Structures are given as C-alpha cells and as structure tokens.
C-alpha cells in the first residue's frame, strides 16, 4: 500500500508536511485530520515503543483514560469555561455534556484520588498514549497543528512540592532519552512556570525555521528559554542628554509608531510605545521602547495579576483622554493611573510619546522628569530579541525558531486541591498531593524528525524510527535468480532483527530509487542480475549517499547493512 | 497502583464486570466510560500485541484513521441518517458536522480509493486498532456495552467478489488464532449476511450465561448460527384433526396469548399468534404458533424487503378491523392483505385466532380451510429454540448464550460502489473493488476472557494475556534475606522472558494471597523466611491450586514456574 506522489500537496507550507504526504506516510481526510498509512503507522509505532520503554524505565505506569470526558470534571477545575472554543464539546442522547480530551489533568486527578489513600503509595507517575483533540481555527503544518493528534501525557503525584522535584527530574531525563533515541536534537528550554516559580517548566524544542515558537539561546552560559519567559539584562543607559521642555505637535492621521516615525523623520527607537492594559480589571499603562513588544507573561507576573489583556476603547479614552495610538505617560487624564515601563527606558530623555490627545504627540520628553513612574515600576517587560544581553551572563542572546515536541511542568496543587486529592501521611493526617504533568506530541515528534532530517530528494530517517530500516530494490522481479537473492537477503536481515521491505513492484529502477530516497529508508540494497553476475549487491546509505558493493551477498551484505545503520559518528568511510 | 476492593461495585450485573473493578483493572469514570488502570492496561496491551501479530501474519497492514469523521463520508453511504441516535455527532467551530467513529467502512473506502489505482495493488487488507464510540441508551455489563471501546477493525479490498473469498478466509483463520492465543474458547457461528448470501458472515462467540446473543448449536453436524440466522426444519405435521366450524367468542380484556390462554383454559401452543408488519410500507400479516416469536431477519429476507417493522396502530385497525391482540388470519377487513405463516402452521386445524374484532377470538379454525394463505407463503419465520430440528441434519438444536467478540463479513460492493472505489483491470477498464470487513472487540475480549475464566476467588488469567504471569509474594519485606531471594527470583524469571510482579507491600500474608487470587496471576510464588529456612519457596498454580515446594530457589523455581505456565493438557500432576 505504498503510493508516492510526484507533486507537493497544495495546502502544505513546510517541507515535512509535503514529505509526509508525498512519501505516502499519511493521507488527508479533511482539514486537520489525517489517516496514517502503513509506512507512517510503522514510524508512529516505533516512536510509541521508544516512549513506552523510557516511561517504564523511569518507573511510570501505563494507563488509558477515556476520550469522552464528562463536563463535571472540567467544571470542578474551572476549565469548562476557560478552555474556550478550542475544546471540542458534545452531548450524549441524555443531554449530558462531554469534552473530547484536549488533555487530562482533571480526569487523572479524579482517578488517582480514588486509588491512592496512603503516603505508602506515593510517589506515583502514570502515563497514557491517547488521541487528543483541539478545535483549531486554522489547522496547518500537517501534524503540527491538527484537530486530532497522538499525545503521550504523564502525571506525577507526590507527597509534597519538594518530593515532586525528583519525579520532575526523572521525567526530564526520560524525555532527553526519548528524543535522543528518536534521532532528534531536541533542546530543553525554560518556559513559564505560572505561579509555581523555580526552574520547573521546560519545553523540548527541535530547531527549525518553520517552528512556531521563538527561543532565546545564550552561547555563553547555556541559558535557553522560550521567548515568553526569556529574561534579559537592561541595556546600558545612554548618557543622560539635556533636553528642552516637552512640546506637543500635531501628527494628523499618524497612529502607529511607524507612521509617526515617518511623519516626524526620526527612528522608531526614539519613541516610547504606550499601551493601556487591564490587569484583573484595573487599568495600567505599559511603556517600552518604540521598537519593542510587550511580553504579556512577564507583565502578568510583574503585576501579580491572574489575567492581563489590552484595555477596551472606553477605558483607554477615560484614563488617558485619547484613543490608542495617541496615548502616552505624560499627564494622562487619570492622574492616579499606574504607569510601568520596560527597564530599558530608565533615564530615557528626548523621547517622543503620545500626547493623550488624538492626533498629537509630545517630543522632548524626559521620563523621569515628565512622567509619574515609580522607581520600582521599571522592569523587564519586553520580549527578548536577538542580541539582547543574557540575564545570567550578559553575553548576547541568539533567538531561533523551535518546534515544541515535549513539555515537562511542575503543577503544584492546582488540580489536586480542586479535587481534594489527598493522602494520609504517617500521622494519618490528610495532605494534598503535589502534581506534575508531562507531555510529548507523538505525531508531532514524527513530523519534527522529518523537518529536521530531509533533503531535496526526500526524508532521511534515523534507523530507530524509520518505517523500515532497509529497502531491498529488486530491479527485475521476473528474474528468478535475483528474486531469490533478494528474499534470501531479506530473511537474513530479519534474522538479525532488522526490518526490511523488498520493492518488487514492476517499475523501472529509476522509479524505485526515487521512491526509496523520497521515503527515506536509511539503507538501500540494490539487487539486480547485472550486479549478481559480477557477484554482488550494492548497499547505499541514505544519509550520505555512500555506497559499497558487496561481493558475497549473504553474510557480507548483512554486515555491510549493519555497519551502515550505525549512528553518525561511529561511521567509517566505507561504513565497516 | 494496585488497589483491590472487597465489595462488588453497585452497578455491576455480571461477574466479569465485578472482577474488572474489584481487581483494580479498571475504574469507572461515568456511565459507560472507564479508565484502564495499570494492570488492566497490561492485559489490554497483550491482547493488542496478539492481534497485531496475527494481522501482520495474515498479510494485513496497520493504519490508523481519525476518530473525528466528517459527515460528508457518512452522507455518501447514506448512513448519516440510518445510523440514528446511537452515533455520537458534533460540530467544530466552523459548524462542520462530524461523527465520532463507530466503525470506518466509509473512511477506509475513501482512503483506499485514493491509494489504489491498479489491480496490481490488490488484494489489500488494512487494519487499525482504534477507539470507537456508541451512544448507548443504557451502558451496562462494564466493557461489554460501553460508550467508548477499543476495537480492531480490518477491511479487505479485492478485484472481485470471488477473489474476496480468500481474503475472508485468511481473516477467519487469523481470528481463530487470535482467540486461541488469548486463551479463549470462541466459536465461529453463522450470522446474517444481508444481501450477500453464502456463508460469508461469521460471528465469534464466547459462551456465557450472561451473553446477550442466542446461538443455536447442532451436535449432529456441527452447525452453529446466531438465532437471528439459525434455520430449522419444519416440525412433523400433526395428524389433521377434523374440526367443526369456526366459532367466535368474547374474550373480554384478554389481549395477550397468555391472557386468552388462561381465559379459555387451553395451552398457548393451540393459538395462532398474528402480527401485522409493514414491509417497506406494505402491510403483511405474519402468523406463527402461539408460543413462538417472529424472526424479523428471516421475515425480511423471505419478503425480499429492505425494512420490516411492526405496523402502526392505524394500519392494523384499517387492514384487520381490530387492534393488535385481537387480529387473526380469518377474514381481515382488507381481503387482499397478504398473510404469511411459519411453516410449523402448515395443516394446522382446531386453532384459536384473533377474530379481527376487539375483545373476540375465533376457535375451531382450520388454516387451510378458513384463511387465505398461499402455499408458498409458509416458511421458516420463527426464532429457533432449544430442541428444534437442525435444518442441515434434522437432529435437535441446542440454544446457548454467547458474547460476540468478533465478526467477519463479506460486504460486497456496498461501500465501494457508493464511493466509486474502482481500480483498472488488465485491460485498463474501471472495476469496482469487492470489500470485506472484520472486527474484534479488543476491550470486550479482555472482559470475555474473565467471564469465561474465573471462580469465586477471582480471575484465572490465561498466561498469554495475564497482567503479569507471576506474582512473587514477599511475606515480610523488612526481612533482607527473603527480599533478596524474591528480587533474585524476579530477575531470574525476567531473564527467561516471564513477566513478574513482586508484592512487597506491608500487608498481612492473607491479604496478599487474597489479592493474588482476585487479580488472578497464573502463578504465585511465596517467598518467606520460614520457607527459606527449610530451603525453598512455594509455587502455586492459580487454575487448579496445585502447589509445589521448590527446595533450591533459583534455577529450580524458574523451571517450576515455567512448567506451571504451560497450557492445560500439557500439565503433569506436579507440573514438571
């Protein structure tokens, strides 16, 4: 059931998506829904096997929970509302509400609560490999953003937040092994920890230009963090320049920094960008250099708020006197409005700000002199960018794109408290369990392998997760001698635990070679009458196109294939 | 994460359901929804592995299709309507309709159609192990009738109906092997083939009093068929008794055969039961012996109808002159009403029938004389019952109860024609593929194993699908010597490929023994200081409680365990 395509699918934007379809690994059913064809299924199964082995090795126990999740569970945690329209919902014939599992913190807490009663049963880590669902507005990138995807989710339960650290570390290590065994270079990077704090949230990212996440790396100290978290050091303040009195000038029709900057003929960095946010309902003005963007996660943490979002039009007008685009930190209408600023603005003078009057800006602003910003309200509030100074060591950060394939997270007691998931300690007192959650996108990992490992001819599978490790191209299936040699070789390789597919289709050699390269089998063995007459078969390694002609087909060919399957680094020129 | 319960769950009606919960194999989430806990998951995984191996051996290729199925696919086959309220449906945020997969004939046909173009790619059999959904009105019997269940569904595609026979036979044989390897006695029984005909629909049943299906078995010739299909031979006609003229008498308030029979003081078999059906909209009266029930599948086939159902009240009154309970074959109002009768009524005389007048019955009826029933309208229309004559050999049928664990079915071109799933034959002409479908209830098979193999103390797992094959009961975990012996034995057994769990909980020996029996590990090994002092451990086989004390714990204990794990029949008294 192998059917490759010569044309890229019309809706594929990135290479791995194109290759998944062209190599016949999967078939689109509808937007964001795919059938895994036999070749794709084999890779998916191999990835699952690696995950199971590493989870088991880490002491996690496999379970499986229903995909249909009663609404009551989600109402207990408050997420029936907060999950929003991205969660699929449906009713049964008795009009009970269900979610289609997007994740399972609620359900697993409910299960573990009923099974665990004593500290003697802790720590406990359970995992499942189960289909998850997300009602994506715009499914894209193949398996990267699909409506239905295979995910390994694990959950740890411990006697205390401190005890949970060991469970977290065990999963962190298991994840490193999983990705390494899948042949993936996946970098653990720090991610936002919400209210937990500490270094207990890591995402595992595969670097790729097509990645949806930005990650800041420091070559100096090894710091790596998602941009939503990445901390920077304040830039060295410019020498404080004397500046004249503020002067308000009309900037008709110019709303954005870009427009005003063009109108006034000065660079965007000379501006102070000002935005009014609502932090748990209270308006706050946020100022930052004109060429910077607000990091809302940092802002939320700095303000100690549960939720920050841009304030609505009415609020902006009421507290500043102007509409968005013309607001600024100098004398807003509401003189008690709290103003916070990115720390790169400390000591800024000679700036241009919105005048809190529609269609006007004010220049010659010295923030310390003209705006009411408390000293403690300067902080790291902007998204880090290439060249920013690393918060740890001061050397420049490099920002790269990443595909998130895994996430480990110390949850604390958010769910266990909501479900009253308690155990009895040694004194028979009820204690709330501490929890962690750990996810691997299984189908996404498969695509990330391809995104990281392909060339213009097709996929280059690492042997551990290739659909088959070896493709034996039988050039002329009607030649009995060659056919016997091919199937003998298949049997000899399988006896060594190597999985082999024999391409015995009635196709031209060129078609077979192109398909073998496109599908990306790690090793191709060509068996043809001409070669056999000269006494041998040709063994080719996909990753570097190195070939070797083996004279005696049986034992020697097996040895050559095994050598070719060795990982990078262990190789010799002629892969012996 | 092993937590057994002493009490049966309140909603469990059958032993296997009780044991699944009590042994801690699964946990109820809500009606018809269960989480598989680690022990249950291990068994479920072992069953899946057996199925995969046998599917692969039969040449089937694994795929996986989405659970979310676009409504368009179901509309193409016409089943979006006909599946009714048992199919879960939902919308995405763009208001597109989806079904939650109850089965996948439509989807697989759509996939295969796009992948297969030539006869060279056929035959092709694909399978998936995927969660299925059914909106049960009343979920019950644990995993037997749940809303979400794991199913292996396979689909074969062939060049012709004749060629499809080989695919069918290969699956039939694979199913026999699957159930045998799971330690299940599953009987293949003939089932209704719909419009296909032939012997190309078999269900695999596990006999159990709690089974929801009736199956007729013939000891004489080996015939076995679901009661919906089971054919019988007509009973020998009684000597035609002279009977007087029909006489209509009042039977006030008596509606059912039972009530009239009591009122008139004659046995139910003296009555002719008459029911008005609608066959594709046309009314038909069906007569059968008063103590028999209509087999609607047989009736539908006999009438050549697509759909038969009881006629509505108005129709009954219009065509007979009376309401249900008082209708009969003698002079109904509509004299052109077709009357068909079960063949056991041929030559029946002296019968009592409804008088087609509410509250009246007619006695002394001779059907041939008094009713207009064409000779060709006597047929096998009743459900077979215990003691009926086998249609093949005439010997008595025995009716037993069964749990359906699998079904193989030759579908013909129902779906391939609807989807125009064609291939090019050798002359490059388009031909419609012939299709078969094959299902195994994976989660249901797990429960059927328990239903078939348990006793008052708990489950008796066959070694092939037991959560663990061996439980080593370490009586006192604080005794270092015994603990070392237990873990050494675990390592020695695992080195032999036997999976072992060590019960090192701080519980009394009695609790550990009860749990080991309840969970049903095939072999229990007791390791305690007292035994070790005498130089040995005790090996007990669950299925017959036979024990053996092994003097030298290491190699001898391993040999004794391996002997105890041998299948029934291969056993010796002391399982050597």
Image: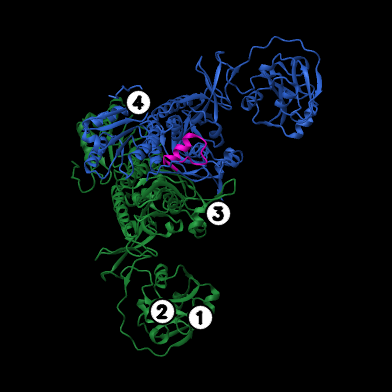
Chain colours: A green, B blue
User: In the rendered structure, are the residues bearing label 1 and label 3 in contact, judged by CB atoms less than 8 Å apart?
Assistant: no
* Label 1 to label 3: alpha-carbon separation: 39 Å
| Residue for point 46% across, 28% down | B426
Looking at marks 3 and 4 on the same chain, the residue that comes earlier in the sequence is marked by 3
Q: Quadrant of the C terminus of chain A?
A: top left
Helix, strand or loop at mark 2: loop
Q: Are marks 3 and 2 on the same chain?
A: no
Q: As rendered, which of A442 and B311 lies closer to the eye?
A: B311
Residue A320: give its label. 1
Q: Quadrant of the N terminus of chain A?
A: top left
Residue B275, percent from left and from top: 71, 27
In the displayed structure, does residue B325 sit left or right of residue A55?
right
Residue beneath label 2, please? A271
Q: Label 1 neighbourhood size at 10 Å, few (<14), some (14-19), many (20+)? A: many
Q: Is residue B300 above or below residue A129?
A: above
In the displayed structure, does residue A478 sit left or right of residue A358?
left
Q: Which residues are magenta?
A: B7-26
Helix, strand or loop at mark 3: loop
**Chain label for disc 4:** B
Looking at marks 1 and 2 on the same chain, the residue that comes earlier in the sequence is marked by 2
Residue beneath label 3, please? B94
């Amino acid at each position: 059931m192998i059917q490759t395509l010569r044309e890229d699918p019309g809706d594929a934007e990135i290479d791995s998506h194109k290759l998944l379809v062209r190599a016949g690994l999967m078939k689109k059913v509808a937007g964001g829904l795919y059938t895994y064809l036999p070749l794709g299924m084999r890779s998916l199964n191999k990835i699952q096997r690696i995950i199971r082995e590493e989870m088991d090795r880490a002491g996690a126990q496999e379970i499986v929970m229903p995909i249909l999740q009663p609404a009551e569970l989600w109402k207990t945690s408050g997420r029936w509302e907060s999950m929003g329209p991205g969660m699929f919902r449906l009713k049964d014939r008795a009009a009970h509400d269900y979610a289609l599992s997007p994740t399972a913190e609620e359900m697993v807490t409910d299960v573990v609560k009923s099974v665990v009663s004593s500290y003697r049963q802790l720590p406990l880590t359970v995992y499942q490999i189960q289909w998850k669902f997300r009602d994506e507005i715009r499914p894209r990138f193949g398996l990267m953003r699909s409506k239905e995807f295979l995910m390994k989710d694990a959950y740890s339960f411990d006697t205390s937040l401190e005890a949970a650290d060991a469970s977290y570390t065990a999963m962190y290590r298991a994840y490193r092994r999983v990705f390494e065994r899948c042949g993936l270079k996946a970098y653990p990077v720090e991610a936002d920890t919400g209210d937990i704090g500490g270094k207990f949230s890591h995402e595992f990212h595969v670097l790729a230009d097509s990645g949806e996440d930005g990650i800041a790396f420091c070559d100096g100290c090894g710091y790596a963090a998602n941009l939503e978290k990445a901390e920077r050091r304040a830039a060295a303040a410019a020498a404080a320049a004397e500046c004249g009195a503020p002067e308000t000038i009309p900037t008709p029709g110019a709303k954005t920094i870009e427009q005003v900057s063009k109108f006034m003929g000065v660079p965007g960095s000379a501006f102070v960008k000002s935005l009014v946010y609502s932090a748990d309902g209270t308006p706050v003005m946020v100022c930052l250099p004109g060429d910077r963007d607000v990091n809302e996660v940092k802002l939320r943490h700095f303000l100690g708020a549960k939720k920050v979002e841009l304030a609505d039009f009415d609020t902006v007008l009421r507290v500043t006197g102007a509409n968005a685009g013309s607001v600024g930190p100098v004398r807003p209408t509401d003189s008690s409005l709290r103003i916070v600023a990115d720390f790169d603005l400390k000591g800024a003078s000679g700036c241009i700000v919105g005048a809190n009057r529609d269609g006007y800006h004010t220049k010659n602003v010295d923030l310390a002199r003209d705006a009411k910003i408390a000293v403690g309200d300067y902080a790291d509030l902007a998204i880090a960018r290439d060249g920013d100074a690393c918060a740890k060591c001061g050397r420049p950060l490099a920002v790269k794109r990443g595909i998130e394939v895994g996430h480990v997270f110390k949850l604390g007691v958010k769910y266990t408290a909501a479900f009253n998931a308690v155990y009895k300690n040694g004194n028979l007192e009820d204690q709330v369990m501490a929890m962690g959650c750990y996810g691997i996108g299984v189908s996404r990992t498969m695509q990330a392998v391809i995104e990281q490992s392909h060339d213009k001819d097709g996929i280059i599978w690492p042997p551990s997760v290739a659909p088959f490790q070896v493709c034996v191209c039988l050039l002329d299936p009607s030649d009995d001698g060659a056919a016997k040699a091919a199937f003998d070789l298949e049997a000899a390789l399988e006896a060594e635990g190597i999985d082999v597919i024999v391409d015995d289709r009635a196709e031209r050699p060129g078609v077979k070679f192109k398909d073998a390269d496109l599908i990306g089998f790690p090793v191709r063995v060509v068996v043809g009458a001409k070669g056999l007459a000269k006494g041998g078969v040709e063994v080719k390694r996909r990753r570097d196109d190195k070939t070797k002609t083996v004279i005696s087909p049986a034992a020697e060919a097996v040895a050559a294939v095994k050598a070719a399957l060795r990982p990078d680094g262990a190789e010799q020129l002629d892969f012996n």
